[in-house]
Structure formats: structure tokens, C-alpha cells
Amino acid sequence: MSFFATANRYLTRGARLMIHERKLNKTLELNGPLTACVASVKAVLHEIEHPIVIQNEGFANLIAGASADMVTVLERASSNGYTEAEEARSLGLIRAVI
């Protein structure tokens, strides 16, 4: 939803907006020369860090011009928080409830 400008965001009555973080399910096994292990760890770290940047760009787009701030969005996102349609409208996350 953050791709769309706020003026183009609508929810229907009774709808809920779920704000969530990107997820990762990965096992890292280190085996071999230490330099290879470092490369493996760095690669996984990049798999974690870069999506966080992308995720937060989306959150910034979601709250642009809204009364909600990044702290609020990140708190909701960490627990897959739902926001009722009317609350989303009052926070300025959507234009209207239809």
C-alpha cells in the first residue's frame, strides 16, 4: 500500500491494515576455511540489512504526510499489528474509508 500516494489509498469499512516486517527464515552453517566463513556471514548479514532499508523506505512512504511516526509504525510492524480502517484514516495513512 505504501507504493500509492496517500490520496490514492482507501479501505472499506471493517477492513484492517496490517503493518508487518519482512521475514527471514534461514540457517547459517559455517564449515571450511575461516575466510570463507567470513564471506558467508557477510552475505547473510547483507540479506538482513538491505531488506531492512527497503522495508523502512516503504514505511517512510506509508507515513509521509501522516500523523503516525516511524516509531509507531515500527512497533506495530514488529508484532504484525493491525490498524482498523477508521484509525488508519485518522492517522493519515489512507485518504478515506469507503
Image (spheres, helix red, strand yellow):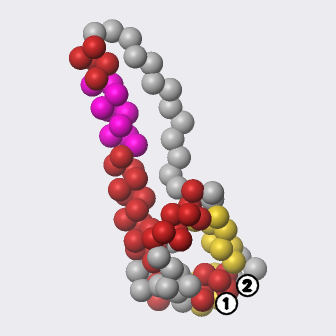
On residue 5, which mark appears? none
Residue 3 visible in rendering: no
For label 1, the SS is: loop
Q: Quadrant of residue 20?
A: bottom right
x and y, in percent, of residue 9 in the image? 53, 82
Q: Which residue is mark 1?
A: 98
x and y, in percent, of residue 45 in the image? 35, 37
**Relative vertical location of residue 78 with respect to residue 58 in this rendering, above or below:** above
The one nearer the camera, 12 or 25, is 25
Q: Give the left or right position of residue 17, taking residue 45 as reference.
A: right
Figure label count: 2
**Relative vertical location of residue 85 with respect to residue 16 in this rendering, above or below:** below
Where are the magenta residues, as a range? Answer: 39-48
Residue name at image x 37 percent, y 57 percent: 54
Q: Residues within 10 Å of mark 1 (few under 14, many from 20)?
A: few
Q: Which residue is mark 2?
A: 13
Residue name at image x 49 percent, y 85 percent: 67
x and y, in percent, of residue 66 in the image? 47, 84
Q: Give the left or right position of residue 72, taking residue 32 as reference.
A: right
The residue under label 2 is which amino acid type?
A: Arg
Asked whether the residues under the numbered discs 2 and 1 touch, taking CB atoms below 8 Å apart as contact, a structural biologist would say: yes
For label 2, the SS is: loop
Q: Give the left or right position of residue 87, taking residue 42 as reference.
A: right
**Magenta stretch: dominant SS?**
helix
x and y, in percent, of residue 96 in the image? 60, 90
